[in-house]
Image: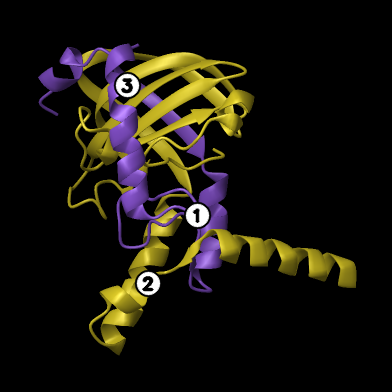
Amino acid sequence: MRRQAARALGLLAIALAATGCTSLLERSKNPFHFVALYLADRAQDMMEIADVGITISEEPGFAIYGAFASITPVGAGYVNGRFIGLGGGQFLGLGAGDLGSTRFYLSAVGVLVWGYEEFGWQSFDTKNISTIQCQDVGLAGILTPPQGRPGPVPS
Amino acid sequence: MGHVGFVGNLNYFEILDLALGFAGIDLCGDDGALLGHWPGQTAQEADEAAYEFEETRRTFQDQPTTSRSRW
């Protein structure tokens, strides 16, 4: 039991060392604002846990793509349209300044040992990589350095 | 294939981000921002990495079809 607790504390310490603390103090104007932002951040985190919904696009798209835990990417896909559902930090447009749906972009390819994914949610420009999430996945992706803004990995 | 598709995805890392977020730890670096950054990286460094990657991306990806979409 003690060993497990020590291991958990060790993992937490690594997480703390590798990441930053929340930026709430810099963003909040007063204590009430602090609480509101804290709750808004947690709500957004919650809406980022899963992506479940329907995509619709003016142009026909194609996507048969899957990657279990970002380790086994297989398939390919390209969709640029709108998303109706829960995902990307919004739900039916709520949290994204929309109502009903939000903008969505996916471009992905996977060949099992390596894959590459690009996601765009809410507000993005497909010509500007710093506005979309992009990442290498698969076992080879672990060895590849980060490329810009990451999406959630593993997923 | 076509105009309608289905999406199903579970983001394991975001579960941890939510759990640690209650303790004030921003694992994904996305608190108050639409896009996050890799652990150990600042938002500015992430943008710089994206800028460097942009040229490589342009070589491999054809863009015209994306710009036509009005959605």
Please give the letter of the chain rendered in purple.
B
**Count of labels in the image:** 3
| Secondary-structure class at tag 2 | helix
Under mark 3, the amino acid is Arg
Residue visible at 48% across and 73% down in the picture:
B24
For marks 1 and 3, the one nearer the N-term is 1
Q: Chain of mark 2?
A: A
- In what quadrant of the picture does the C terminus of chain B appear? top left
Relative to B22, is B41 above or below? above
Q: Disc 2, disc 3: CB below 8 Å?
A: no
Q: In this orientation, does residue A66 appear?
A: yes
B23 and A87: which one is in front? B23
Residue visible at 27% across and 18% down in the picture:
B58
Report which residue position mark 3 lands on: B57
Local packing at callout 2 (Cα closer than 10 Å; few below 14, some 14-19, many 20+) is few
Instruction: State which quadrant residue A24 falls in.
Output: bottom left
